[in-house]
Image (cartoon, helix red, strand yellow):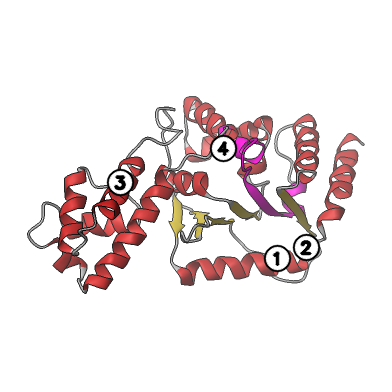
């Protein structure tokens, strides 16, 4: 993944600008769309970055209503609209995605930094192919997924990982690894040793910070996964978590993002310093060999 794809970031950026312009013009969403060729739901989804207008003419209509007549500004916003409507890198992979997954992938691809934690397994963005395959196979009879779904999902996960090692502007990752999750045997011993070695290699990268949260910790431990995506450029920090209903929940509401941030900060405070991570990974690998 040589360059970071941007369609979702463009949509989010355009949505924020349009929301600000609407407020400056003194319109509610209902007032803004009255008499135009799209409804309140469409504008709401555009403002939150979930979708693009189907036609540039709809955007021009809206800008005219807001009193935006500067041609340079209009053209810039139309260009954002056009770029936001382009396909993401994963389009056409054939993966039957979980509900909410496209939105998550779009935000993740635009992120400059991601902070992650998972209470039971190694976070997906850090998994080796063999470990990811074993995780999916373990869940396959429970979730009733197909072999093809597993193959495509693992392939997609490996593609996402490329952001950590790309040459241009690699993704920054800060992960808290819960010791019980590190010790949870996924696949055979070879799979686990390979995973530990891969984590040690990642920990050596300047853009990756790995901290282990000991299983003896008496402080706060989140009971679900935590994924905080920091986009920069004035775009909203976004939080994501999986749900029990085989869906992916994504939000950029400040109150909810703040709660996720407090979760992560509390676990960071109780975790071992990053310099201790390689030693512990080596110890875990040695224990398996014995």
> Disc 4 vs disc 1: Cβ atoms closer than 8 Å?
no
Q: Is residue 236 visible?
A: yes
Point out the image quarter for the N terminus. Answer: top right
Residue in the image at 53% along x and 26% along y: 151
- In the image, the segment drawn in magenta is 159-182
> Tag 4's secondary structure?
helix
> Disc 1 vs disc 2: Cβ atoms closer than 8 Å?
yes
**Marks 2 and 4, the one that precedes in the sequence:** 4
> Tag 1's secondary structure?
helix
Q: Which one is nearer the viewer's eye here, 183 or 173? A: 173
Q: CA distance from mark 3 to mark 1?
A: 39 Å
* For residue 290, above or below residue 68: above
**Marks 2 and 3, the one that precedes in the sequence:** 3
Of badges 3 and 4, the one in the foreground is: 3
Q: Which residue is mark 2?
A: 271
Point out the image quarter for the C terminus. Answer: top right
Residue 163 is a magenta residue? yes
Q: Which residue is mark 4?
A: 160
Q: CA distance from mark 1 to mark 2?
A: 6 Å
Q: CA distance from mark 3 to mark 4?
A: 25 Å
Q: Which one is nearer the viewer's eye here, 167 or 37? A: 167
Badge 1 crowding class, 10 Å Cα cut-off, few under 14, some 14 to 19, many 20 or more, is many
Which numbered dot is residue 81? Answer: 3
Which numbered dot is residue 267? Answer: 1
Q: CA distance from mark 2 to mark 4?
A: 26 Å
**Marks 3 and 1, the one that precedes in the sequence:** 3
Residue in the image at 47% along x and 49% along y: 107
Residue in the image at 52% along x and 55% along y: 231
């Amino acid at each position: 993944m040589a360059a970071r794809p941007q369609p979702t970031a463009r949509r989010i950026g355009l949505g924020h600008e349009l929301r600000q312009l609407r407020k400056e013009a003194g319109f509610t969403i209902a007032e803004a769309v009255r008499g135009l060729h799209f409804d309140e739901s469409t504008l709401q989804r555009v403002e939150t970055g979930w979708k693009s207008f189907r036609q540039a003419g709809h955007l021009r209509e809206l800008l005219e209503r807001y009193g935006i007549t500067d041609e340079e500004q209009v053209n810039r916003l139309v260009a954002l609209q056009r770029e936001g409507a382009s396909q993401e890198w994963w389009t056409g992979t054939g993966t039957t995605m979980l509900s909410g997954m496209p939105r998550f992938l779009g935000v993740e691809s635009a992120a400059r930094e991601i902070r992650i934690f998972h209470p039971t397994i190694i976070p997906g963005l850090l998994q080796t192919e063999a470990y990811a395959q074993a995780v999916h196979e373990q869940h396959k009879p429970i979730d009733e997924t197909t072999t093809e779904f597993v193959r495509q999902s693992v392939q997609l996960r490996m593609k996402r990982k490329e952001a950590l090692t790309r040459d241009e502007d690699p993704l920054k990752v800060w992960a808290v690894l819960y010791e019980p999750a590190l010790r949870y045997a996924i696949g055979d011993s070879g799979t686990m040793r390979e995973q530990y070695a891969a984590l040690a290699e990642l920990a050596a990268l300047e853009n990756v910070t790995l901290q282990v949260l000991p299983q003896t910790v008496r402080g706060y431990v989140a009971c679900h996964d935590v994924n905080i995506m920091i986009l920069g450029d004035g775009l909203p920090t976004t939080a994501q978590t999986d749900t029990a209903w085989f869906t992916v929940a994504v939000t950029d509401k400040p109150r909810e993002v703040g709660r996720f941030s407090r979760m992560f900060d509390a676990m960071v405070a109780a975790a071992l310093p990053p310099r201790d991570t390689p030693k512990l990974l080596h110890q875990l690998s040695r224990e398996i060999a014995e």
